[in-house]
Image (tube, rainbow, N blue to C red):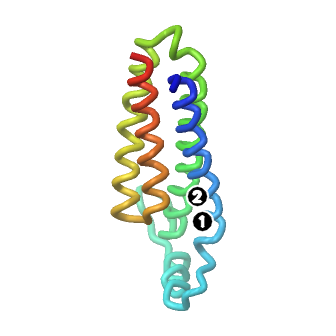
């Protein structure tokens, strides 16, 4: 399979992850489980100063989640752009792709350990497809 196609499959996987993350982001603070609701209320209810800002744990949780939107979107844009020139400029494309592939494999491991299998699988597969794109270009 051509590198361009493999990288665009990785883009699609990351887009699916972004959409799933969006659904989770919009509903994280409305759990049905009463014990989890208690935890969320506590996260929202207490603020403390840290490095000059007065924020709650919920603020930090929400902020990290929003940052991840931009990380996913940036990755999609970079992969799509690289897929356009990977055949004509392999050395530069490969240098850009290696860190992305390694990072998404690492995301997969972290998501497996701290989140859930679907998210882990999507990230890990995206990393695999980027590596396949690299190997196909060589």
The percent coordinates of residue 106 (x first, y second) are: 35, 47
Q: Residue at x 52, y 23 (%)?
A: 2
Question: Are dots 2 and 1 in contact, CB under 8 Å?
Answer: yes
Q: Which quarter of the rendering shows the C terminus?
A: top left
* Mark 2–mark 1 distance (CA, rounded to whole Å): 5 Å
Crowding around mark 2 (Cα neighbors within 10 Å: few <14, some 14 to 19, many 20+) is: some
Q: Is residue 63 left or right of 51 when viewed as pictured?
A: right
* Residue that extends furthest to the bottom in the rendered view of this protein: 34
65 w.r.t. 47: above or below: above
Residue 113 quadrant:
bottom left
* Residue that extends furthest to the front in the rendered view of this protein: 1
Q: Nearer the viewer, residue 39 or 136?
A: 136
Q: Secondary structure at mark 2?
A: helix
Mark 2 = which residue? 21
The percent coordinates of residue 4 (x first, y second) are: 56, 24
Q: Is residue 121 left or right of 66 when viewed as pictured?
A: left
Q: Residue at x 53, y 43 (%)?
A: 71
91 w.r.t. 94: above or below: above
Mark 1 = which residue? 24
Q: Secondary structure at mark 1?
A: helix
Q: Residue at x 37, y 60 (%)?
A: 112
Q: Is residue 12 left or right of 119 when viewed as pictured?
A: right
Crowding around mark 1 (Cα neighbors within 10 Å: few <14, some 14 to 19, many 20+) is: few
Q: Is residue 68 left or right of 124 when viewed as pictured?
A: right
53 w.r.t. 95: above or below: below
Q: Residue at x 52, y 87 (%)?
A: 38
């Amino acid at each position: 399979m051509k590198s361009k196609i493999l990288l665009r499959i990785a883009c699609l996987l990351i887009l699916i992850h972004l959409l799933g993350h969006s659904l989770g982001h919009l509903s994280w603070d409305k759990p049905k489980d009463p014990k989890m609701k208690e935890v969320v209320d506590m996260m929202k209810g207490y603020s403390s100063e840290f490095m000059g800002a007065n924020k709650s744990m919920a603020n930090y949780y929400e902020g990290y989640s929003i940052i991840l939107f931009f990380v996913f979107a940036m990755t999609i844009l970079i992969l799509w752009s690289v897929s356009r020139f990977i055949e004509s400029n392999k050395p530069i494309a490969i240098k850009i792709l290696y860190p992305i592939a390694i990072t998404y494999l690492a995301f997969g491991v972290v998501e497996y350990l701290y989140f859930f299998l679907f998210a882990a699988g999507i990230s890990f597969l995206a990393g695999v497809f980027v590596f396949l794109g690299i190997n196909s270009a060589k």
